[in-house]
Amino acid sequence: MKSGGLWLVAAMLAVTVTGCSSGSAGAGRDRTEKLKAEISELKKENKFLKEENEALKRDLVVRPVTAKEEGGTAELLSTGDSPAAADSGDEHKRIAKGTPLTIDGTGEYTITKTSFGKKVNPSNPGSYYTYYEAKEPGTTYLAITLKVKNLAGQAINAGGVAEVEVTYDNKYEYSTFATMEKNGGEDFTYTNISTIGPLKYGTLVFMAEVPDEVKSSGKTLYADFEIEGETYRYTIKK
């Protein structure tokens, strides 16, 4: 459509040239030269648009990539007509309860428990122990327990294992804080003063104080774990 429009403009300009008054020959010649120059520019632009159009057509030809061509890694190329491709959730890497997520040379991460409660206790309370209680009326704690095995060559600080953010109904975001179990789950301790030795385990509990509605509602609820610069989504409620 663009090229047809340009030729029409060129034709109209040519008609204008032939209709110039003979009484103003000098001015007419100047105008003619100017119009010829404009027509020349329009022709160049028309040629450029044609070439650009052909290039776009070539770029739109998409074919699947085989695993062999990608050195053993197959890629799914979206053509925009797949409903799954439009789902923003498919962009995220996943972590599932009970399934270890292993990052070579870094750690093994397993979500072992997810719970709601006004009060959060260590898993095996001793005679004296620390607990966390949601003080604000109409709120509760969402607690996610993460078991971590250190696969690095040195001890790691428990406070740097992961950052977790909870999202409810795809728009309400809640930050979390973490605590770490000690003495086999008899008590909690601060993550920033705790370490996990090489090939040893640590149990962290991430907590978010959320409205009671989050617990009782059937709306979407998920937690994003940021580990070693990557984000892994844990779906709690679909």
Image (cartoon, grey):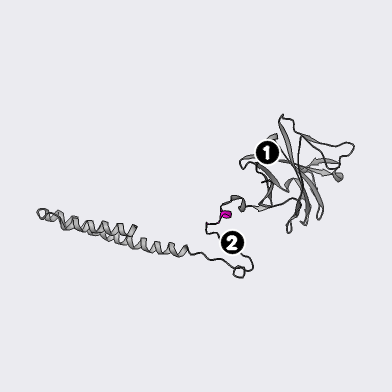
Furthest residue in direction left, as rendered: 23
Question: Which residue is depicted at the point 27% across and 57% down?
Answer: 8
Identify the secondary structure beneath mark 1: loop
Query: Toward which corner of the image does residue 65 lie, by quadrant?
Result: bottom right
Quarter of the image with the N terminus is: bottom left
Q: Position of residue 190 (x, y in %)?
A: 78, 41
Tag 2 residue: 76
The amino acid type found where label 2 is placed reads Leu
Indicate which disc, 1 or 2, sits on the residue closer to the N terminus.
2
Residue at image coords 79%, 53%: 149
Classify residue 16 as left or right of residue 104: left
x%, y% of residue 207?
A: 73, 40
Residue 226 visible (yes or no): yes
Q: Nearer the viewer, mark 1 or mark 2?
A: 1
Give SS at disc 2. loop
Question: Which region is colored magenta?
Answer: 81-85
As for residue 75 lying within the magenta part, the answer is no
Q: Residue 101 got which mark? A: none
Q: Residue at x 56, y 54 (%)?
A: 83
Above or below for 18 versus 128: below
Relative depth, front residue between 76 and 200: 76
Direction top: furthest residue: 137
- At horizontal 70% and vertical 34% (from top left) the residue drawn is 212
Q: In this view of the protein, which residue sits in the foreground, 217 or 6?
A: 217
Q: Is residue 83 magenta?
A: yes
Q: Residue furthest bottom?
A: 68
| Circle number at residue 217 | 1
Discs 1, 2 touching: Cβ within 8 Å: no
Q: Type of residue at label 1?
A: Ser
